[in-house]
Image (cartoon, helix red, strand yellow):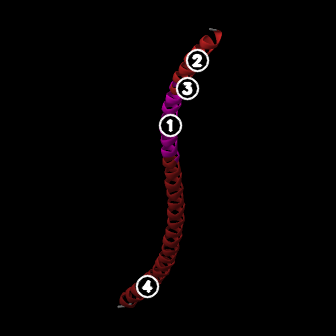
C-alpha cells in the first residue's frame, strides 16, 4: 500500500507539469498570434504602398500615352496642312508662270508694236 500514494503523487506531479506546459504553450501561442497579426498588418501596409505606387505609375503612363497620342495627332494634322499648302503653292506657282507667260507675250507685242 505504500506504493499507491507514490503513484498518486507521481501522477499529480506529472499532471501539474503537464498543466504548466499547457499554460506556457498557451502563452507562446498568444504571443505568436500577436506577432502574426502584426506581420499581417505590416504586409497589408506594404501592399497598400505598392498599390499606391503602381497606381501612380499607371496614371503617369496614361498621361504620357495621352500626350503622345495628342502629339501624333498634331503631327498628322501638320503633315496634312503641309500637303495642302504644298498643293496650294504649286497652284500659285503655276498661275504665276501662266501670268508671266501672258505678261511676256503682251510685253512682246507692245515692244513689237513700239518698234514698228
Disc 4, SS: helix
Q: Which residue is mark 4?
A: 19
Task: Please state which of the two labelled residues, at mark 3 or mark 1, is closer to the viewer.
Answer: 3
Q: Which residue is mark 3?
A: 96
- Is 29 located above or below residue 69 in the figure? below
Q: Measure the alpha-carbon separation of dots 2 and 4.
A: 124 Å
Q: CB under 8 Å between callouts 4 and 1?
A: no
Task: Please state which of the two labelled residues, at mark 1 or mark 2, is closer to the viewer.
Answer: 2
- The residue at the far right in this view is 115
Disc 2, SS: helix
Which label number is shown at residue 79? Answer: 1
Task: Please state which of the two labelled residues, at mark 4 or mark 3, is closer to the viewer.
Answer: 3
Instruction: Identify the residue shown where x is 51% and y is 22%.
Output: 98
Circle 1 packing at 10 Å, graded few (<14), some (14-19), many (20+), is: few
Task: Please state which of the two labelled residues, at mark 2 or mark 4, is closer to the viewer.
Answer: 2
Span highlighted in magenta in the image = 71-94
Disc 1, SS: helix
- The residue at the far front in this view is 116
- The residue at the far top in this view is 116
> Which one is in front, 2 or 74?
74
Q: CB under 8 Å between callouts 4 and 3?
A: no
- Earlier in the chain: of badge 4 and badge 1, it is 4
Q: CB under 8 Å between callouts 2 and 4?
A: no
- Earlier in the chain: of badge 4 and badge 3, it is 4
Q: Measure the alpha-carbon separation of dots 2 and 3.
A: 12 Å
Q: Measure the alpha-carbon separation of dots 3 and 1.
A: 25 Å
Which label number is shown at residue 104? Answer: 2
Instruction: Identify the residue shown where x is 51% and y is 58%.
Output: 59
- Is 61 located above or below residue 106 in the figure? below
Q: Measure the alpha-carbon separation of dots 1 and 2.
A: 37 Å
Amino acid at each position: 500500500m505504500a506504493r499507491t500514494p507514490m503513484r498518486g503523487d507521481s501522477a499529480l506531479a506529472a499532471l501539474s507539469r503537464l498543466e504548466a506546459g499547457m499554460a506556457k504553450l498557451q502563452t507562446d501561442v498568444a504571443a505568436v498570434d500577436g506577432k502574426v497579426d502584426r506581420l499581417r498588418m505590416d504586409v497589408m501596409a506594404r501592399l497598400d504602398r505598392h498599390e499606391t505606387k503602381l497606381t501612380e505609375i499607371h496614371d503617369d503612363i496614361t498621361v504620357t500615352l495621352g500626350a503622345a497620342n495628342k502629339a501624333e495627332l498634331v503631327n498628322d494634322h501638320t503633315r496634312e496642312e503641309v500637303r495642302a499648302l504644298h498643293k496650294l503653292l504649286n497652284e500659285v506657282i503655276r498661275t504665276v508662270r501662266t501670268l508671266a507667260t501672258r505678261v511676256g507675250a503682251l510685253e512682246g507685242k507692245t515692244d513689237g508694236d513700239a518698234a514698228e
